[in-house]
Structures are given as C-alpha cells and as structure tokens.
Amino acid sequence: MPQLERGKARVAALMAAAAAVFAEKGYDTATMTEIAAGAGASIGSLYQFFPTKELLAAALHEAYLERLSGELDRLREEAAGRPAAELGDQLFERLADFLAQRPAFVALAERRDIDKARKRATRALLRRQIAAILAQAAPPLPPGAPEVMAVVILHLMRAMITLSGDDEEVGPPAVAVFRRMLRAYLAG
Amino acid sequence: MPQLERGKARVAALMAAAAAVFAEKGYDTATMTEIAAGAGASIGSLYQFFPTKELLAAALHEAYLERLSGELDRLREEAAGRPAAELGDQLFERLADFLAQRPAFVALAERRDIDKARKRATRALLRRQIAAILAQAAPPLPPGAPEVMAVVILHLMRAMITLSGDDEEVGPPAVAVFRRMLRAYLAG
Amino acid sequence: MPQLERGKARVAALMAAAAAVFAEKGYDTATMTEIAAGAGASIGSLYQFFPTKELLAAALHEAYLERLSGELDRLREEAAGRPAAELGDQLFERLADFLAQRPAFVALAERRDIDKARKRATRALLRRQIAAILAQAAPPLPPGAPEVMAVVILHLMRAMITLSGDDEEVGPPAVAVFRRMLRAYLAG
Amino acid sequence: MPQLERGKARVAALMAAAAAVFAEKGYDTATMTEIAAGAGASIGSLYQFFPTKELLAAALHEAYLERLSGELDRLREEAAGRPAAELGDQLFERLADFLAQRPAFVALAERRDIDKARKRATRALLRRQIAAILAQAAPPLPPGAPEVMAVVILHLMRAMITLSGDDEEVGPPAVAVFRRMLRAYLAG
DNA sequence: TATGAATGAGAGTTCATTCAT
DNA sequence: CATGAATGAACTCTCATTCAT
C-alpha cells in the first residue's frame, strides 16, 4: 500500500517494531501504541498502513512465511539425491536458524484469533514443502514417510524454540539429542 | 482460605471454571468475569478467594503440578529396574494422559507474566522427577543421560499437545513416530 | 439488568442523561463519555448497564415506544364513537405533547445504524395503533382511510417537531393550519 | 478558486462525490476520505478546494439553494394570476422533483454544526420566495396567508422525503392525501 | 496544484480490581 | 462471605486536518 519511498521505509520500520513487540510480549499483550512508538511513528501512521492489529500480525506472518517458503524451495533444489539423514540435518539447521532470527514467528503462528482453517492450511503448506525435500532422498524413504517426518520435524522445531528459552545448561544437550534422534530415525 | 464446607465447594467450582476458560481462551484472553460466571458465582466471590487473576492462575497451576508430581512419584516406585525404553513408554503415556485431561495446563505453564526464575524452577522440578525415574532403569543409562532425556521427554510432550489440535490424518502417525524415536533412543 | 436499588437509580439517571445528550447533539455526535458525565457516573458504570452506544439508544427508544403505545391504547379506549375530526384533534394534541416532552425521540427513531426492517416494523406498529383509534370514529371513515390517515398524522407530527425549532413568529400559525387541515380532511 | 479548466472539473467531481456520500451516510458519518476517493481524487486535492468538511457541505448546500431559488423565481414568473390551489400543486410537484433528484439536500440543510442564525436565514429566504409565488394567486389569498402557507408547504415537503423512504404500500396514498389537503385548504 | 504520508485528539469499549450493602 | 455496582486506566481504532515532496 505504501506508494512513496517514505511510505515504504515507514512500513518496514513498523513491521520491524511489530516483530520486536510481538516477540517480546506475544500477540495479545502487544499494543499498537507500543509498536508505533517502537517505529518512531504516530499511532495514526501505523493505522494508515495496517488498519487492524490482526492485519498487521497477518502481514508480518505472511512475510515470514514467504521467506521461509523461499528458503525451503532453495533447499529442495540443492538437496536432491542426498541421504535422508543428511537432509534431516540440513532442515534442522536451517529451520532453527530461521526461527532464531525471527523470534516473533511462533507468536504469530499461534495467535488465537487466526481462523482454524487458515492455520491448518498454512501448516499443510509447510508440511508439503518439507515432505518434498525429504522425498528427494536417495535411497528413498518408504512411501508416506516424508509426510509424517515433515510433521515430526515441524514439531521438533517448536520444541527447539522453547528450548532456547530454557536453562543454558540443559538446552544444548537436548538439542543434540533431538538431532541425533532424527538422524537415526531417518537413517533407518 | 475457605473455612466452611460451602467455601470449599465454591473454590472447587471456581477453579474448574477457571480451568475451562483458560483452556479455551488462553490466560491473557480469559476474563475474571467469565470465570466467575462459569462457576455460577459473582465476581466479588471470585475475588474473595483469589485476589488476583494471576494468583488464580498460579493456584490452579500449582494444583496441577502437585497432582502431576504425585503421579510421577508413583511411577517411580512402580518402575524400578525396568528397561529404559519401557520407562520411556510409560512416561510418554502417562504424561500424555495427564495433559489430555487438563487442557489448561499448557496455557498456565506458559503465561507470560510468570516470572522467569519461577518458571525455570518449576521446570527443573519436573525434570528432576522424570530423571529420577529414568535413573532407575536397568541396565542403567549412561551418566547424565536421565537429565537430558527428561528434557527431551518434556518437550516431546509439548509437541504432543499441539499435535492433538492438528489434522487428524497427520497427527497419530507422527505421535507414533515420536514414540518409536524415543524408544529406539532409550534402547540404545 | 440492575438488580439492586442503587442500580435501578443509576440506570434511570443514565437514561435521562442519554436522552438529554441525544436530544441536544443527535445520535452520532453524542458521546458515551458525555452521557456518563451527565449522569454523574463513570464510563465503566455506563457500560455496565448498556454494553454499547447502540444498545443504549435502543433501550431508550424502546422505553419511549412502550410509553407511547400505552398512551395510544388509553386514547383508543376513551375515544370510541367520537367523530373523526375530534379524534384527529386528540391525536394531534397528545402526540405533540408526548414529543415535546421527549426531544430525543426523533433523534433515536432516525438514527442511521438501526436496521431498515426494524425501523419499518416500529413504524408499522404505531401506524396500526393510530389507525385503530381512527377506525372507531362515528360516523366511520371510509375503508382504508384510517391506515392512510395514520401515516399522514405521523408525518405531520414530524413536521411539528421541526416547526418547534423554527422561528416563533411563523411556527404557531403553521401548527394551527396543520390542525385545521387535518380536521377538515377528517370531517369530510 | 480553481483557475484552470482542470480545476473546475475537479471541483465538480468533488461536489458530486460529496453529494453522493452525504446522501448515503449523512453529514456526520460521511468522511472526507471517502468523498475524495469517490471523486477519484486524493485527500490533499479535496482539501485544496474545500479547506474544511463544513465548508464543503456549505458550498454544496449553497449551490443547491441557488438552483432552487432560480427554479422558484421561474415558477413565480410563470404563475401569476393562477388560482391558489393550482399554485400549490405546482409548488408541490416541483419541490418534490427537486428534492428527489438531490437526496443530499436534507442532510445538508439539517446538519447540526450549522449555526442557528444562518439556518433560520436560509429558511426565511425560501419561505419568502414561496410566499411571493402564492401572493400572486387570483383570487388572492387573505393577507398573511401566503407566508403561513409557505411554511406549511416547506414542512410538507420534508414529510414527503421521509415518506419516499417508507413502505411502498403506504407511501403513495399518503402523498396523495397531503396533496389533496393542501389543495382543499388553498381552494378555500 | 497534486499526492499521499503524518499527526493526534478523541471515541467506543474492556476488564481487573475495589467498594458498599 | 456474597453480591453486584463502581471505577478508570488502557486499548483499539477513526478521521479531520496538515505537511513534505
């Protein structure tokens, strides 16, 4: 919606501020006022571009999903013919990176006012992309396995996130275990 | 705090209502008014027993934790000398049951206004109990493993919960995989 | 909704204040804040009883309509067998009185966010009551006439209202003319 | 204010859009943004020509009044020497037409932020013009009657407008009655 | 002039919490 | 203890209007 250069910069600043606030407080507790302030904008300016708190969240979420989708596409291209365990490792690493750099992602993905169907659709999309990657493994996984493993990986990622907020002593080894479990399972 | 019989019934009803509302709407979105109404009580009455929304949540959470703690204690007694994989299975099942019956648990465990230290402490407690169970496995797990596996199990449980809200087609196989992964890992 | 005596008094005060503000500023321009202040209540108190500006307006409107309906019922009982012109005069007078004492009535009846069907229904009700009165005239009006005359009278009343806001020099004679026109028409 | 051709077209488009929006939503509820959009212009452009919402409304109202005034002037010229009832009929018809084609007129005439004196003055002007027409009736109306009847006619017009928004079954007969009432009254 | 971004006072509404009865 | 009314800070959102380009 922004047409001028100035507007584009504003929108970028607003989304960045929104990401920060959503990450820190969660969707419900985040306030539009704080987001606007965080971007050095007036509340009116925020609403000029995002007519609703929900729409703001949706826009940010969408942007994240597109980026993630692109990254998975790229990974699929690179990864044809590799062994499954290695693919799992790659996925693990890249997804973890992606999420670590976007701490608002989970808050956005789980906000309650998102409608169920949409949520499901979004998850299905990601699942399919990850399954597509795993389907390229050589030797190939048994039929059906890529889809199930996609779900597994996605949920492991969720666990990862929480883990990074955990104790430092206990987190890293657990991450390693998750990784090994996945590797072992994919290897055979 | 309640001294009379009547008071105890009130408190029970209030906590039940709170559990229902927290489960349905999440901590932030739940309102004290709705909770009171759900228990057939007036707001005034609710505040008589729980002087704060946060205290209400804390009380409910505490109650859940105690119950869970008890269950884990019992499991530890029963489980001495079993193989690790079997213990993992047992834990898996019992924890899943526990959470399935208390859908407010996660919402309470993750509410944002809880102070970090307390959160950490709570998690540490559970971890220790689970580790204690795993430490009784025969043959024994390598040193340090029970603690790490406790973390892993706890996070798998979290994944489980989310999974139950997922598509029906894709959820159950993923649960099975998690189970098998854990089993395999604990077995060797 | 108010259950205690105190609450009933509040509601009465709030409705009175609302009537005053709606009358003075019209529905759109009236503010909930001003209404609350006018009743010596806090904004929260106002919302306790009227969860929406629209509902407040609706409640007030409803109350007015009920009162008016009662008045018309009474008039019908008293008026059986009188000549039509006299009934017209009576209606004219009573309705004018009613509206003069409730300057918010028109503002409420015409607010834009009321749904069309409801508006129509309300008007139809009043029309029917007035027609019922005119139908009792002796000698009787021709068939169909009471219904049409009811519409005419209702619209004359609307004109009356506006007229009272007009110049003082020109208003009263015009009112008199309206009255005579109606009389003449009903007389033959 | 607009000096170029382009400017005049802009102003015309803006006023047309304003008329449409005022008619549909009423003065209070109409927004400058929607008006600008309706004219295919930017807000900045709208404010270039009409520095205030109120001034925009005033300009539109003024334009309408001038047009109406012209029409009444023409009618006065045509109508000298006709019987009063016929003049009433003519007025009735022309005014109704005028208003039917300009649904924003009433909204503009009744907006609340217009100052009372101005409102009164405007009404007085129209009244005088209508009275001037009626004063030309032959045989002449009694002294004072034209002024009073002008008021009456003006208010009947208002009723007319509302009537056209009413039920279709009940509107037209009522219009006819109004017409007949006026005719009869003017005839004697 | 034209455009679209920027501003911020103010409106409606919510809800945890307190108080009077 | 119970009830329900009272309070007001805080929140989301709107819109007339101003400004920079």
Image (spheres, coloured by chain):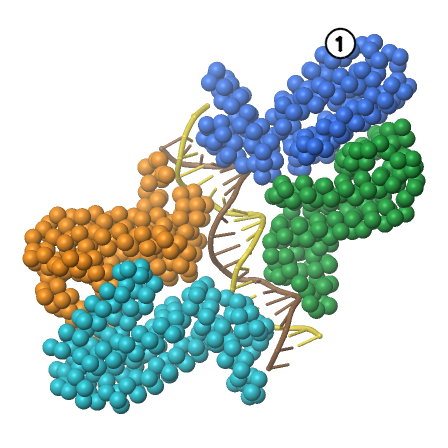
Chain colours: A green, B blue, C orange, D cyan, E brown, F yellow
- Residue at image point 32% right, 37% down: C5
Q: Is D73 on the left-hand or right-hand side of A129?
A: left
Name the outermost residue toward the front: A143
Instruction: Identify residue type, mark 1.
Output: Glu
- Residue at image point 21% right, 72% down: D179
Q: How many marks?
A: 1
Residue C165's place in the image compared with A88, above or below, is: below
Residue D54: image location, x then y, percent: 45, 73
Q: Quadrant of the C terminus of chain A?
A: top right
> Does the image show residue A180?
no
Q: Quadrant of the N terminus of chain A?
A: bottom right
- Residue at image point 51% right, 23% down: B13
When asked about the image quadrant of residue B119, the answer is: top right
Residue D163's place in the image compared with C32, above or below, is: below
When asked about the image quadrant of residue D99, the answer is: bottom left
Q: Nearer the viewer, residue D171 or A104?
A: D171
Residue pointed to by mark 1? B78
Residue B57: image location, x then y, percent: 60, 30
Residue C13's place in the image compared with B114, above or below, is: below
